[in-house]
Image (cartoon, rainbow, N blue to C red):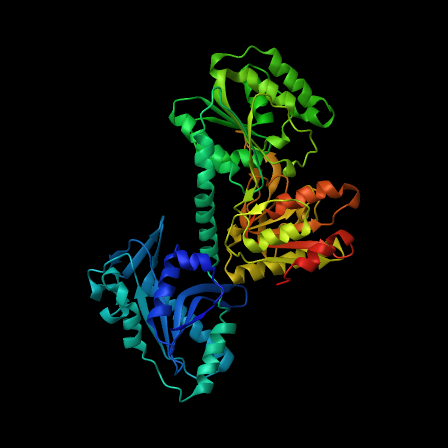
Amino acid sequence: MAHIIPTDISRLALAGGHAPELETLRLLQSGLPNDYTVFHGVHWSRGYERWSHFGEIDFVVLNCSGDLLFIEQKNGLLEESGNGLVKRYGNKEKNAIDQIHRSLGKVREAFQQRHGNKIRLEVDCLVYCPDYRVVQLNAAGLDARRIVDAAARDGIAARIEALLGPGTRQNDEQFQIIHDFFCQTCKVVPDIHAHVSAQRQGFVRQTGSLTAILTNLEMYPFRLRVTGTAGSGKSLVAREFFARSVDAGQRVLLTCYNRPLAERLKRSLGDGGYINTWHGFCHAFLESRGHTLDFRRMKTDPRFWQRVQEQVTAEPIPDEWLFDTLIVDEGQDFETEWFEILQLFLRDDAAILWLEDPVQNLQGKPEPELDGFVRYHARTNYRSPESIARFIRNTLPFEFESGNGLPGLGVAVHGYRNPQEQPRIVGKRIQALVRQGFGHDDIVILTCRGVNSSIFSGQEQVGGVKLRQFTGEYDPAGNQQFTDGRLTFDSIRRFKGQEAPAVILVDVDPDPRRLQQIQRLLFCGMTRATVRLEMVAREENPENRGFLQQADHS
């Protein structure tokens, strides 16, 4: 059996074979003898004066002599062109042969820079396309022996042995130098997106039973109140109920408190129903009735929205503003009066689904009074992997059951003494996460403060990467405007109802006078992370000792 590096790939992702590369890794591990070492997900970088080049080699196979075989795996359908095998990604295309030769050249450069000319890398290459049968082998840009397609995929291990051979142990020093080079210089990392993919598939699969139960309940009129912990699948229930109601020809209203969540729901659910925040709903209704709201008065009139609500209730409600189904997401942020007003927009015996998590009540509002509802408690968190769920249970006073069997990549807490130190710390962590395999789109920075009160609100970039953050402005259609950045920065409050593979919590400096509220805020922030959680906490704050002690500090 071949030696596999790294060995810390998610055991469930590996066993389930959700990612095609993990299935290949299993074939190589079982099909090759112990004369071979297989490096999986080799990330290389080559720095220049003003920029760096980055790349990835799917597999590098090393024999006992230190000879190498690079494997480029291309999944799905390919195209055979005059330039070789091409994989299309939207409007872009990547040539498998060009990719493998580019990687080969860059790795040679990196090796020579480190060891000079005293050792020469002996490298061969192979293209593996398990889902595609190559018709014109000679036109693919490599000879037939160096292409393993769908017709020969069960023989990939034998093909590697034929090309590379087992080698000999005549020069252990050379073997060790090359082995260490791939372990250290090229930064062998676990496949981050295998973790992400496994988490998403597991979440949908595990919460599917909850969705099926709740959306298939029969009661008349339908009145269901779901009290569920973070990551229990409330949003999936809302989406499924929304889709089923639309398919049944009903007019559906889905409302929530948080604007970013409402916009995300619009993007994921598309047309067919009406989605808006509570305040956005009031604004849209009054505008349809010929009223214009002067939002400049919000800063000087503390009763601005109360007056808006009074205007709403004073207006007759036309038929086009009546709904057959109401879904309230993040209901813990709603007030009883808001629900009473929403009922004015419902037809007789309309179906109502109410979703909430009292632990994530960050506004300090009293629990809404809902009469005549059946209540269902969902106590299992399927989103947070084991390592993150364990950290949350050990540091915060909230009870929940962990239903995610994936290990995740743990939690790290980094201390600061002066808030001004945080951008530098976060910059280094971003670079480390990227080296580990996370993309910039996988990472979000969330502040425990308001977006305008954090040290990061004045930063255009962190770690050399531009921040994407809310400008406070809206376009003519009422959509929020964001800066043109690659890395999201937001507040925990605004990011409620969303998630990301890697979350960095900043400004962690709990006020003991508001400890319960801050703990709720941190619970909300921690449960956004699906693979990796990082925190930047003030060292002198005694409330942070538990976080610093429980974290892995990696």
The image quadrant that residue 520 belongs to is top right
Q: Position of residue 481 (x, y in %)?
A: 57, 37
The image quadrant that residue 117 belongs to is bottom left
Q: Where is residue 63 in the image (x, y as percent from the top left)?
A: 38, 79
Work out which residue is located at the far bottom of the displayed protein and give it: 170
483 sits to left or right of 14: right
Q: Can residue 101 be seen here?
A: no
Q: Where is residue 151 in the image (x, y as percent from the top left)?
A: 22, 61
Instruction: Report the number of numbered marks.
Output: 0
Identify the residue at horizontal 68%, vertical 34% (top origin). Answer: 363
84 sits to left or right of 366: left
Q: Can residue 63 be seen here?
A: yes
Identify the residue at horizontal 57%, vertical 41% (top origin). Answer: 379
* Residue 393 sits above or below residue 340 on the image: below
Identify the residue at horizontal 56%, vertical 18% (top origin). Answer: 343
Q: Where is residue 107 in the image (x, y as percent from the top left)?
A: 44, 72
- Tell me the quadrant of the picture where the C terminus can be found: bottom right
The image quadrant that residue 374 belongs to is top right
466 sits to left or right of 249: right
Identify the residue at horizontal 67%, vertical 37% (top origin). Answer: 362
- Tell me the quadrant of the picture where the N terminus can be found: bottom left
* Residue 266 sits above or below residue 36 on the image: above
* Residue 141 sits above or below residue 63 on the image: above
* Residue 189 sits above or below residue 282 on the image: below
Q: Nearer the viewer, residue 505 or 242?
A: 242
